[in-house]
């Protein structure tokens, strides 16, 4: 028989590893573009990205459900 993978999520998960920076935030907390380089960021790597979120791994132990702000640098290629 042929196996078929069924996606049961609302959004397709794109598996990709991209280095990112993140920091924990409190509800409603925001920083300005000017403050982006002065706050403390932690390193992480994505496992997958979807329309509903991002899954990533880090060496830090974080609280499940904690709100985070992500900083990601994308490279544009002409390939």
Image (tube, rainbow, N blue to C red):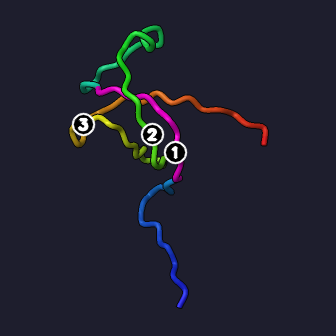
Estimate the x, y position of residue 18 in percent, counting from the top left: 52, 39
Q: CA distance from mark 1 to mark 3?
A: 20 Å
Mark 3 highlights which residue?
Answer: 62
* Residue furthest right as drawn: 78
Mark 3 or mark 2, earlier in chain: 2
Q: Residue at x 60, y 32 (%)?
A: 74
Q: Secondary structure at mark 1?
A: loop
Quadrant where the C terminus is found in the figure: top right
Residue 1 vs residue 52: left or right? right
Q: Quarter-wise, where is residue 65 in the image?
A: top left
Mark 1 or mark 3, earlier in chain: 1
Instruction: Report if residue 47 lies within the magenta region.
Output: no
State how many labels appear.
3
- Characterize the local packing of mark 3: few (<14), some (14-19) or many (20 or more) Cα atoms within 10 angstroms: few
Q: Secondary structure at mark 2?
A: strand
Q: Is residue 24 above or below residue 14?
A: above
Q: Magenta span covers which residues?
A: 14-24
Estimate the x, y position of residue 3 in percent, counting from the top left: 51, 82
Label disc, if present, on residue 78 of the rendered structure: none
Proximity of marks 2 and 1: CB atoms separated by less than 8 Å: yes
Estimate the x, y position of residue 6 in percent, counting from the top left: 47, 72
Q: CA distance from mark 3 to mark 2?
A: 14 Å
User: Most prominent secondary structure in the magenta stretch?
Assistant: strand
Estimate the x, y position of residue 78 in percent, counting from the top left: 78, 38
Q: Residue at x 45, y 12 (%)?
A: 37
Q: CA distance from mark 2 to mark 1?
A: 6 Å
Of residues 41 and 25, which is closer to you in this image?
A: 41
- Characterize the local packing of mark 1: few (<14), some (14-19) or many (20 or more) Cα atoms within 10 angstroms: some
Mark 1 highlights which residue?
Answer: 17
């Amino acid at each position: 028989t042929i196996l078929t993978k069924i996606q049961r999520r609302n959004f397709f998960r794109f598996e990709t590893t991209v280095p990112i920076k993140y920091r924990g935030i409190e509800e409603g907390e925001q920083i300005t573009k000017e403050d982006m380089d002065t706050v403390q960021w932690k390193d992480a790597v994505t496992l997958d990205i979807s329309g509903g979120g991002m899954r990533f791994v880090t060496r830090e132990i974080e609280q499940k459900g904690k709100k985070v702000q992500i900083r990601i640098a994308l490279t544009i290629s002409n390939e």
